[in-house]
């Protein structure tokens, strides 16, 4: 939709200027915080890139698929050593500006230039991404992929274009290979689409959506064949779910479902007395046996104290959006920032969801399908230890749906 004579603050030139500013911000963070020491998950991603350069992804001895190969493939040109890591970190700036552009283009069509610019700023300067956007982590690439998928999928449905649907499938496929949990989201969305085929007026859109999902899944088949060859398991997206469920269901005093590393489990003074001995036994086992032991323990925890696991789930929902409460750790000031940013979006999304449900025909089909897709993602994310870095990937879709409903039905919505 083309806006007529928008205020300069919300003109195309203003949007380009803010995107250029975000490029500078993330580029400056990458340079200013560059280090020859890898932190957080950086080592695992760089190791994956180095392995791919040698013709394999996991070893025969330890076929542990913690994450997919999407990000390590991108990192392959930068796996040479510390001098090349800076360029890998600088990529985040381009991913984030691309994500802003996709949000701006998508929201502008369904709402107006004001909503579009606010959405782009929200994504580009979200505190979770600014805080970790300098690092060799998957969030910037995943944000680029999910916003690219949102933009191209909505375009494909509006135009009923199978060619644009291929672009959407590529973005979705790479998102799954980057964050393999979306493989489960894809399958759940496919089931939803098949169930909705009873709605005759939706069938053309649903057929196109199923085409996107099937093509994206086909992109992942080589990875799934590889995991099958290494683990013997069909549709093995990851070998890390057991440990996540272990922490999610842990009902020791002072714990609330928050995740801890192996080092924490064995060395943290509050955790080691309860988990060290178990971890010593588990980590002597091969990957698949280890995964089975973690899952068995998680099931036993659930049966022993369902109310404690329910409490952990409630904590997990809050932690997903706001980063607290955390077991045996002091809370951080950035939690206040997350409450200030994510809180209003969540409240507006809930209100928009209620209004949209009452006037569901006023919301485009493609937006409803994106809402279903992201709902599966958020719902599934609450079943394992969650962090705000997981919630942030839902922000573009939540904002899109919110802007559509508020712009059409709420008078205090943002207007040109």
Image (tube, rainbow, N blue to C red):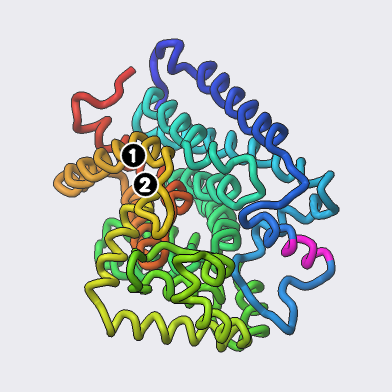
Residue 114 included in the magenta stretch of the image: no
Secondary structure state at the residue bearing disc 2: helix
Q: Position of residue 118 (x, y in %)?
A: 41, 28
| 89 sits left or right of 141 in the view | right
Q: In terms of secondary structure, what is the magenta stretch mainly? A: helix
At which x and y percent is residue 251? Answer: 33, 73
Pointer 2 or 1: first along the chain: 2
What residue is shown at x 62% (from left), y 73% (from top)? Answer: 65
Displayed quadrant of residue 280: bottom right
Disc 2 + disc 1, Cβ < 8 Å: yes
Secondary structure of the residue carrying tag 1 is helix
Quadrant of image for the N terminus: top left
The picture places residue 6, in percent across and down from the top left corner, at 40, 14
Task: Please tell me how crowded label 2 is: few (under 14), some (14-19), or many (20+) other residues with Cα within 10 Å.
Answer: many
Q: Is residue 334 above or below residue 264?
A: above
State how many labels appear.
2
Q: Is residue 269 visible?
A: yes
Query: Who's the residue at 50% across and 32% down the image?
Result: 125
Identify the magenta region.
Answer: 47-53
| Residue receiving disc 2 | 322
Label 1, residues with CA under 10 Å away: few <14, some 14-19, many ≥20: some
Mark yes or no: residue 186 visible.
no
The residue sitting at 30% across, 40% down in the picture is 343
Residue 339 is tagged as 1
- Looking at this view, is 311 or 208 the one in front? 311
Q: Is residue 256 left or right of residue 103?
A: left
């Amino acid at each position: 939709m083309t806006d007529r004579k928008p205020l300069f603050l919300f003109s195309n030139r203003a949007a380009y200027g803010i995107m250029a500013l975000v490029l500078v911000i993330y580029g400056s963070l990458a340079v200013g915080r560059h280090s020859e020491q890898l932190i957080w998950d950086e080592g695992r991603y760089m190791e994956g890139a180095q392995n791919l350069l040698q013709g394999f992804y996991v070893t025969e001895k330890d076929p542990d698929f913690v994450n997919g190969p999407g990000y390590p493939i991108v990192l392959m040109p930068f796996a040479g050593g510390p001098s090349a890591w800076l360029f890998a970190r600088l990529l985040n700036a381009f991913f984030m500006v691309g994500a802003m552009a996709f949000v701006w283009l998508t929201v502008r069509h369904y709402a107006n230039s004001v909503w579009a610019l606010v959405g782009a700023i929200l994504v580009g300067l979200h505190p979770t991404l600014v805080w970790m956007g300098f690092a060799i982590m998957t969030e910037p690439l995943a944000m680029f992929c999910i916003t690219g998928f949102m933009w191209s999928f909505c375009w494909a449905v509006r135009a009923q274009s199978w060619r644009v649907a291929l672009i959407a499938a590529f973005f979705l496929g790479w998102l799954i290979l980057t964050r393999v949990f979306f493989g489960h989201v894809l399958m759940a969305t496919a089931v939803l689409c098949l169930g909705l085929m009873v709605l005759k007026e939706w069938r053309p859109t649903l057929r196109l959506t199923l085409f996107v999902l099937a093509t994206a899944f086909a992109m992942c088949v080589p990875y799934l064949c590889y995991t099958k060859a290494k683990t013997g398991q069909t549709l093995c997206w990851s070998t890390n779910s057991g440990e996540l469920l272990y922490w999610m269901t842990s009902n020791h005093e002072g714990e609330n479902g928050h995740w801890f590393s192996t080092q924490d489990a064995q060395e943290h003074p509050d955790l080691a007395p309860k988990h060290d001995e178990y971890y010593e036994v588990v980590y002597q086992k091969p990957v698949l046996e280890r995964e089975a032991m973690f899952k068995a323990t998680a099931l036993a925890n659930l049966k022993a104290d369902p109310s404690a696991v329910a409490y952990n789930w409630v904590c997990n929902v809050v932690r997903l959006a706001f980063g607290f409460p955390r077991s045996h750790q002091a809370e951080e000031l950035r939690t206040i920032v997350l409450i200030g940013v994510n809180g209003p979006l969540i409240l507006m999304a809930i209100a928009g969801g209620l209004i949209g449900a009452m006037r569901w025909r006023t919301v485009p089909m493609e937006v409803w399908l994106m809402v279903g897709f992201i709902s599966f993602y958020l719902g599934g994310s609450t079943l394992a230890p969650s962090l705000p870095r997981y919630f942030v990937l839902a922000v573009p879709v939540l904002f899109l749906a919110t802007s559509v409903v508020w712009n059409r039905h709420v008078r205090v919505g943002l207007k040109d």
